[in-house]
Amino acid sequence: MDRETNRTLLLVEDEAIIAKYEAMMLQRYGYRVVTAYRGADAVQIAVTNQDIELVLMDINLSGSMDGPEAAEAILKQRDLPVVFLSGHTEDEVVERTEGITSYGYVLKSSPETVIITSIKMAFRLYEARKQEKEKEARLREQDALYRAILRTTQDGFWLVNLQGDLLEVNETYCQMSGYTREELLAMKISDLDVNEDPEQVAEHIRKLIENKQDRFETRHRRKDGSIYPVEASIQYRPEMGERTIGF
């Protein structure tokens, strides 16, 4: 039998006999179990006991706060995976949980293996979502950093995607080119680079992906049609969503 360790679950069940049976079953699989019999108690335990890693929430709780209400109250204060338990399959019961960020809906009459598998899946989904949120946070931090660079550097600066579209430019490059920021963000590299047509730009980007960075001399066309030399230094940054920066 597959046993997991070092996982503490909050079991929320208002029927004492059922709660005792479910807790014993979970403990056989290596889980530590904290039991709450009322929604309000579940909220207090989940918020104050930092060992809780997942909530098994009965939907139909007696008292002033039922399962979905307790789950919402918990999630407002802690980011935890919640798996709903119910003895009912009626649409109106299931629909009550649809607006709540949960990681599963399991019938109490399900075999033990189904309940345990649902818990394991909830942990995996939670970790995957957590990693995705962390990735998004890192991207936001990187974007903030590059925008700060855009504002302060005395060199012209671009942020472009792999299709050659300009995603961001700084004021220095606007002054160099004579275009406004809004005009530039509607343009591609090939609209400005005199030396490379769209096919050559695409080939240049392909080589950049392989080498991760490049430095070269080229020429750009200003808005008034005049040509000026540019020394470009570019980098491929896939962690920013397959974007390149330069120059």
Image (cartoon, rainbow, N blue to C red):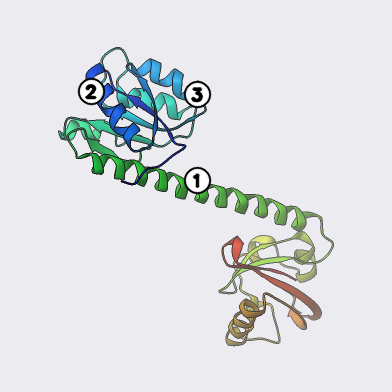
Q: Which mark is residue 49?
A: 3
How busy is the neighbourhood of tag 1: few (under 14 within 10 Å), some, or many (20 plus)?
A: few
Left or right of 184 in this view: 101 = left
Tell me what residue is drawn at x 23 percent, y 39 percent.
112
- Spatial separation of the CA atoms under disc 1 and disc 2: 32 Å
Asked if labels 2 and 3 touch by Cβ distance under 8 angstroms, the answer is no
- Spatial separation of the CA atoms under disc 3 and disc 2: 23 Å
- Spatial separation of the CA atoms under disc 1 and disc 3: 20 Å
Left or right of 119 in this view: 88 = left
Q: Which mark is residue 239?
A: none
122 w.r.t. 41: above or below: below
Tell me what residue is drawn at x 50 percent, y 23 percent.
49
Which residue position is annotated with label 1?
130
Q: In terms of secondary structure, where does tag 1 sit?
A: helix
Q: As rendered, which of 169 and 26 lies closer to the eye?
A: 26
The kind of residue tagged 1 is Lys
